[in-house]
Amino acid sequence: MKTENKISYEINLETLQDLINIENGLFKPLTGFMKSADYTGCVHEMKLADGTVWTVPITLDVDEETVAKLNIGEKLFLTSNGKEMGSILVEEVFETDIEKDTSIVYKTLDTNHPGVRKEFTRNKYRVGGKTEIIDKSILEGTLSPEITKKHFKDMGWKTVCGFQTRNPVHRAHEHLQRVAMDLCDGIFINPLVGWKKIGDFSEDAVVDGYMAMLENYYPEHNVFFMSLKTQMRYLGPREAVFHATIRKNLGCTHFIVGRDHAGVGDYYGRYEAQELVRKLQKENDLGIYFLLIKEPYYCKICGHIVSESSCRHRDDDIEYINGTMIRSLLAKGHEPDERFMRKEVADAIIELGEKMFVTEE
Ligand SMILES: [Zn+2]
């Protein structure tokens, strides 16, 4: 009887991905888009209404025209390219103060920040409630705790370290991953491949680079590689905790946070993400063990990739692994020095030519 009054709303690909990740349990305990109590708690206290630590708002924004048609307790159908993908039970409609909330969450209102720029394109109206996927075919091949937990169990891993990245593997990341391999039964390399800003490395560059690393260097028995599809928020410290929460839900027992995790430009301090983790750990059980590791660099005296925790040399004796430099060399088709990136990794990326970068947002 309701079919004539069916209300639909067209969502973008990032929101569709949130819907999928909610359905798959990656954002547990969330079972839908946030209602105002969870949203406000998240923005101001980094906690959901029930006290669970939660650092990144996950909300559905809709336009004013749609809001006017909504009734509490009814469903809003969510379409992508006109096709019905899922629905949300309208439990609550609320208004956000985009400018104020963005300044708290992102700690800046500078629109050069890609996350801030994106927030300002959203509607202030949010619909909160439990979501459902209607077209189950979109879940095929997507990352879920069933897949990862089964794999970890089949491999006999009791401890698994999650590794987040949005870049191709260089020697600093290799160092972090080898530390994790020595400490844990297995490592889950889980690069983020959703929406990223123009100029970031493309999904192909990240995946092809890792394939070269796995084929040539890493052991087969303790590495699992699968991509995580969700948008980058460039939220630095908050996103580091969010990334850990997702990996906890995927069955990881450990998670690495290094220098400037999920940062962009110099909006967040070098070790601000680690500081936030330490602060939250004091009062909460985050349910996952954090490896807070200092930035690895090449030391000419030690002749190794080391960090300030393991090497006494400084200044002219050390060379940081400079992502910007690696990027510009690869863009010109040049292999970076092997102290910074493995030749096989560089070659796999160079082969992609222009496709190594994100060219549209
Ligand atoms: Zn040294």
Image (tube, rainbow, N blue to C red):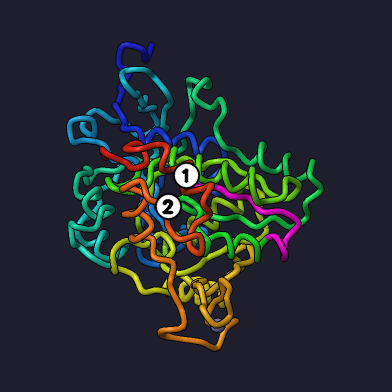
Label of residue 335 in the image: 2
- Tell me how many marks there are: 2
Quarter of the image containing the N terminus? Answer: top left
Region in magenta? 181-191
Image coords of residue 40 (percent x, y): 36, 59
Contact between labelled residues 2 and 1, with CB atoms less than 8 Å apart: yes
Amino acid beneath label 2: Glu
Q: Is residue 129 left or right of residue 332?
A: right
Write down the quadrant of residue 288 in the picture.
bottom right
Q: Which residue is mark 1?
A: 347
Image coords of residue 292 (percent x, y): 56, 72
Amino acid beneath label 1: Asp
Image coords of residue 19 (percent x, y): 44, 35
* Element type at mark 2: loop
Residue at (34% x, 24% y) in the render: 80
Vertical order, 76 against 176 (above or below): above
Image coords of residue 24 (percent x, y): 56, 37
Residue at (31% x, 38% y) in the render: 354
Residue 18 in view of the camera: no
> Given the current orientation, which residue lies at the most extreme right position?
156
